[in-house]
Amino acid sequence: MLSRRSFNLFTLSVGATGLAGCGTGSIVALPDMSVGKPSPKTRTLARPNYAEVYTAYPGERFPVPAVNSGEIDPQYLRQTVEFSRDHAPGSIVVDPASYHLYFVESPGIATRYGVGVGREGFGWSGAAKINMKRDWPDWVPPHEMVERDPEIKAKLERTPRGLGVLGGPKSPLGARAMYLFDANGDLGYRIHGTLEPYTVGTNVSSGCVRMINQDIIHLYARVSLGTPVTVLPA
């Protein structure tokens, strides 16, 4: 069982950095489904026009600011790649070691996105399914996080699910969140957007997988409830 011993490192501000962290349930270790398997080997097949992909996103309830793709390592920008693993089309594979998330398009081909993953002590691997999706989700911190950092409490507001941050431009879950479950229920892990797009490619979260808002919006629209998710060992 992984603890939340590092939640006191999370910060809340009213500026661009916003809230760090994600999840409201207990973090649990998943059974390792990929022991001994190396990270996927990929070759880029196509890249979109990043000036168009990462521009301010239209048609949203809240602003999605443009991201300067030139300030992000190109390997963490969205692209179509060869994918050597045997996962069914429509499934998701997260490789924390390379800071990538793969959405399998067809046998041998995937869309690859850069992600931020768990800090030391918060890594996990195994299998799950996406059993809930939310557009501009509220963020409600776990009780133990608030207890360890009382300064956070003064900056929270009422949401339908308790004290937290209402969905919108200040929510640390960003524009979208997809919630990971196993047979026992909600694991407390999410694949979600972020207020800090330039943190992709780093160990930054409490075990959740964070994506650039433009990328999570793109992925969210293509993912169905029940989608299998495999997280490889770091």
Image (cartoon, grey):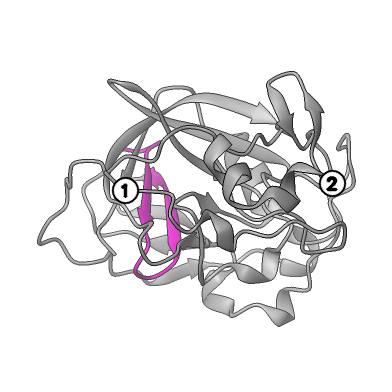
Rendered residue at 90%/47% (across/down)? 63
* Front label number (1 vs 2): 1
Disc number placed over residue 169 in the picture, else none: 2
Mark 2 and mark 1 in contact (Cβ < 8 Å)? Answer: no
**Three-letter amino acid code at disc 1?**
Leu
| Segment colored magenta | 88-105
- Name the residue carrying label 1: 2
- Within the magenta stretch, is there residue 87? no
- Label 2 packing within 10 angstroms: few (<14), some (14-19), many (20+): many
Rendered residue at 52%/71% (across/down)? 201
Per the model, the C-alpha gap separating discs 1 and 2 is 30 Å
Q: Is residue 69 above or below residue 79?
A: below
Q: Is residue 72 above or below residue 167?
A: below
Rendered residue at 89%/40% (across/down)? 62
Using residue 120 as the reference point, say whether residue 15 is left or right of it. right
- Within the magenta stretch, is there residue 101? yes
Residue 178 locus on image (x, y percent): 54, 34
Q: Earlier in the sequence, mark 1 or mark 2?
A: 1
Residue 77 locus on image (x, y percent): 59, 68
